Image: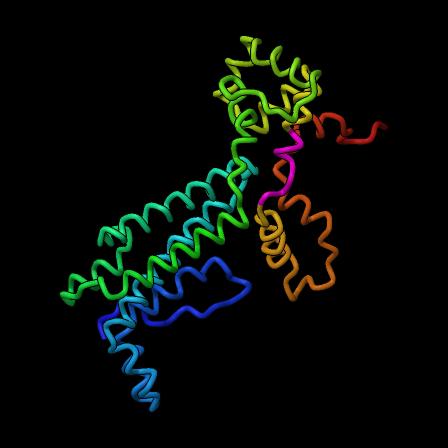
Amino acid sequence: MGADHTAVLFHSEARWLSRGKVLSRVFELREQIQIFLQEEGMNELASKFGNEQFLMKLAYLSDIFSKFNQLNLQLQGKDKYLPHLADQVSSFIRKLELYGRKLEQGNTESFENLTNFSKTNKLTESTVIPCFLEHISALRGHFQKYFPDNSVQFDWVRDPFTAPAPDDLSSSEEEQLIEMTSDSSMRLKFPSQTLCEFWLGVEREFPLIGQKAVEILLPFATSYLCEAGFSAVASLKTKYRSRLNVEHDLRVAISKLQPRFEQICSEKQAHCSH
């Protein structure tokens, strides 16, 4: 029928990152879905896909869920620490405030599918905007409830040379923070290293403040490593290797440590002496 896609994505717990794409695919295939429902005798449900109000709401939901999916992807991956994730969530809450403010002005530019659908069909969104505003307000409330804005407490870890010292540091820890931030060599290292590399180096010279920062960076902030572990097990333990003990292989597969092969080989005797 000229559609870009030939199938609708189904929700699956195993492929949870595709959740945000399901509604977008449904909206793209709305005409084909309507025809299919009519052929199956589901006329009441098929009539929904001919209702302009319903389609505008579907367009809005496909847009907002796409934004959720983008946020979800930003929260995954390697080297993601609590300060980074707090920044991403705080940014999304501020974006929700922006979306609500623009919708109150009748501006739907932030919602691509909704804007294109309305322009193509010469529709006005004024009748459904109150519903969207209520939904965005509820989303903001839920995000602020579960993710309170406490990212400021991580500022000294993100940039110890400009951020003020937090109140929860002991006198000894704050003294070491002052010593560390006054060290010119540390200031030169900071831009060229990751947060984890920098603070691990700090811990060697300033153990108290270094350990305090590492304790903030240490927690597993995402399930990325767990998901990577499941993927590694799936590729290692095939039906031909179903009885394989994958413990050691799994550790090698997901570890970022690089063996020193030359040093290992130099410590081994290639041939026994006669």
Give the number of callouts: 0
Q: In the figure, 143 relative to 243: above or below?
A: above
Q: Does residue 9 show up magenta in the picture?
A: no
Residue 162 drawn at (x, y percent): 49, 18
**x%, y% of residue 57?**
31, 67
Q: How is the image coloured?
A: rainbow
Identified at 49% across, 54% down, the residue is: 142
For residue 135, side relative to residue 82 (left or right)? left
**Which is nearer the eye, 34 or 175?**
175
Report the side of 3 relative to 158 (left or right): left
**Furthest-right residue in this view:** 274
The spot of residue 164 in percent (x, y) is 53, 20
Q: Nearer the viewer, residue 208 or 270?
A: 208
View extreme (left): residue: 122
Residue 255 vs residue 29, the one in the foreground: 29
Extent of the magenta region = 214-221
Q: Please tell me in which quadrant of the rendered image residue 117 appears.
A: bottom left
Which residue is at 47% across, 44% downward? 89
Q: Nearer the viewer, residue 71 or 102?
A: 102
Residue 141 coordinates in the image, percent (x, y): 46, 52
Name which quarter of the figure residue 175 lies in.
top right
Q: Quadrant of the C terminus?
A: top right
